[in-house]
Amino acid sequence: MDRYTSQIAFLGKKAHEHLSKSTVAVIGLGALGSVAAELLARAGIGTIILIDHDIVELSNLQRQALYDEKDISKLKAEAASAKLKKINSSIEIIPQAQHIDETTIKTITAGLILDCTDNLETRFIINKYCHAKRIPWVHAAAVGSIGIILPITNNPDTYCFNCIYANAKSSLTCGDKGILNTTSYATASFQVTEAIKMLTKQKHSDLIRFNSWTNTFDLIKVKKNPSCDICTKKETASREKATISFTISKCTTRAGYSAKPSKNIHLNLTTIKQHFNTIVETPIVLVIKENETEIIVHEFGEILFKTMTDEKKMHTIAKKIYEVGL
């Protein structure tokens, strides 16, 4: 009997063939991601990319499938990969022990992404990248007894994550209010089900919200937000404007010149160092070298030119720093 006999009986042979040729990336291998990854492997997804930079801790074992006590202190990506290869040796498992930011996400080549993270910042990064590349993805979150699942196709006329959560300031994690392991398992199951629907070109749900403690279940219709910064391309325009809105002036208390943006900003130093020769790096400051000159870049936007005197060159360099760092 074939490994997938029961699944093929439900989905059909053609749909299963789509799954066997698909590549799915799972970002986050905690309570949701560990369960989702196992379900994907058992369903015969052809290639599964496992992404997480964290290690297994004792407190994870209450709800995170694939790990046991022998895995404590191991990288989650490596531990999960080893278990999944034992479950299904006929598929490809690619572990990537890395943190996802605006630079590293560009290395993901998948036909669909599962968001199993626990913070809004990473989710907005996933949304922006997937929207730009037209990659479908499924957002999921689980806290306490509540699970949320949101499939996002990234078709031009459909909603994105930012349409719904643009005004969210923070998000709870299971560390804030605790979580039932049944909630995370159920949420991951719904998430993978929606992923299978999308991979096999079936009609999927919009926003799913359930409470496993009160046994309530809601299917919520979601519409595209006409004011969304991502969907309406407003973000690109505002970012371009920000890159040229700065001034360069002679420092009054120290040698050299300083470039300062017109409003408060936060630069992504990780992205900046990918584009410049970095000679010193701290959590809040980079020292880069351009045109044989050392330049100090602070994460809050100020750029110091210690010895350069050509303001035209300084303007060109500062503009590039703001463009790649915002």
Image (cartoon, rainbow, N blue to C red):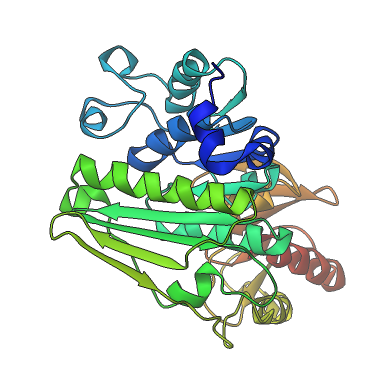
Which image quarter holds the N terminus?
top right
Residue visible at 86% across and 72% down? 312
Residue at the image point whose x is 63% and y is 44% from the top: 104
Name the quarter where the C terminus is drawn. Answer: bottom right
Q: Of residues 217 and 128, which is closer to you in this image?
A: 217
Residue 149 image point, x, y percent: 40, 58
Q: Is residue 99 visible?
A: no
Image-quadrant location for residue 254:
bottom right
Q: Residue furthest bottom?
A: 226
Q: Residue furthest left?
A: 214
Image location (x, y in percent) of residue 269: 59, 52
Residue at 58% in and 67% down: 301
Residue 319 falls left or right of residue 232? right
Which residue shows up at 33% across the image and 22% down it?
Answer: 67
Work out whether residue 195 can be spotted: yes
- In the foreground, 38 or 253: 38
Q: Position of residue 113 (x, y in %)?
A: 58, 48
The quadrant in which residue 49 appears is top right
Q: Residue 223 in the image: x percent, y percent?
A: 51, 81
**Count of numbered marks:** 0
In the displayed structure, does residue 10 sit left or right of residue 136? left
Vertical placement of 320 versus 186: above or below? below
